[in-house]
Image (spheres, rainbow, N blue to C red):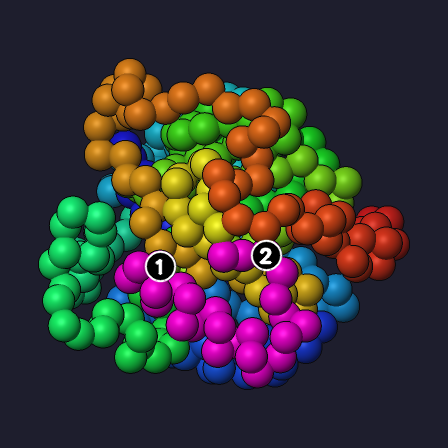
Amino acid sequence: MSLHRLLGLHAAVPDPTALAAFYSELGLAGDPAGGFTGTDGGASVTLDEGPFRRLDSVTVGCADGADLDAIAGRLTDGGAGVERRDGAVSVVDPASRVRFEVRVAEPFGPQPPPDPIVPNAPGAVVRADRRAPAVFGKPRPPRRLGHLVIGSPDLPATVSLLTCGLGFKVSDTVPGVIAFLRCSTDHHNVAVVDSPVPLLQHYSWECDDVDHVGHTATALYRADTDRHTWGMGRHFAGSNFYWYLRDPSGSFLELYADLDQILDDEAWEATGRTAFTLEHVANAWGPNLPLEFVVPSDLGELQRAWAALP
Ligand SMILES: [Fe+2]
């Protein structure tokens, strides 16, 4: 694919200082202007101050200038207003109000793999006479920003812009509800969910494994139990373990592990992908989907803020 990686997101929030402090607690490196990243670097979150929480832009990387030309051509042919400057192609999605930017970028990785930990299982005892190493684990920073989920008042229009225009690939859909799109081998880097207002529904940081998710999310939860939103569980879409916490701006931050990787598009379509219905939206196991995950507690505030904009 011409797109090959997520480069980052830029958000405006009323209190970037509080959000930056939360990121420091999580162990992210960086600052609001230069961007916050996990230990492997990669995609970053940059912040500005704004009157309400808002996703301003999402940037993805492509291979070369020919890719940029092709993307600009497709967007223009589709009737979108394309900007081309500073080596990037960008377009504002009228539905989600997000500016999507594509620029030439070096490939990400390779990521150093964690030490393999094989659990004991019935008939397969691999760890005798000692405790599991995970019980001695500590919270530690996530590895990288992996994906984000954008709330759009016009789901088909936003998905069309991202796929037909920018070149994202569709990994899974629950028709009318959510579409999971990729610009790398990750099952999804951007998902678009039906929403009455433009929204950064959640953004997600990769961890080594389920214990890394557990230790790190637990530390954040114990420091402030009101942050807990949803988890621990395992999703259908992407197969990943997840735990969601509410960040100080009101967006959900997910820690995840064991996401599906799609190296062969045809193999995924032939044998990996299975049709989804509404029952696959939430999880394969774990706590029930909380209402605020679907209807954010600040929805009314966001609706008034968007309505007041030109
Ligand atoms: Fe997610």
Q: Decide if residue 245 is on the left or right side of residue 128.
A: right
Q: Earlier in the sequence, mark 1 or mark 2?
A: 1
For this rendering, which residue is in front, 209 or 122? 122
Stretch of the chain drawn in magenta = 207-232
Residue name at image x 31 percent, y 25 percent: 272
Residue at the spot of label 2: 230
Magenta segment: does it hold 210?
yes
Q: Decide if residue 253 is on the left or right side of residue 291.
A: left
- Marks counted in the figure total 2
Residue name at image x 38 percent, y 77 percent: 139
Q: Decide if residue 14 is on the left or right side of residue 179.
A: right
Residue 82, how many percent across, how many down? 53, 38
Q: Main secondary structure of the magenta part?
A: helix
For this rendering, which residue is in front, 156 or 216? 216
Please determine whether, in this image, residue 257 is positioned above or below residue 268: below
Give the amino acid at mark 2: Trp
Residue 220, how many percent across, how many down? 52, 76
Gap in Å between the C-alphas at discs 1 and 2?
15 Å
Please determine whether, in this image, residue 34 is positioned above or below residue 58: below
Instruction: Mark 2: give few (<14), some (14-19) or many (20+) Cα within 10 Å.
Output: many
For this rendering, which residue is in front, 38 or 100? 38
Q: Quadrant of residue 119?
A: bottom left
Element marked by disc 1 = helix
Instruction: Mark 1: give few (<14), some (14-19) or many (20+) Cα within 10 Å.
Output: many
Element marked by disc 2 = strand
Residue 230, how many percent across, how many down? 59, 56
Residue at the spot of label 1: 210
Residue name at image x 13 percent, y 67 percent: 128
Give the amino acid at mark 1: Val
For this rendering, which residue is in front, 204 or 120? 120
Checking the image for residue 10, the label placed there is: none
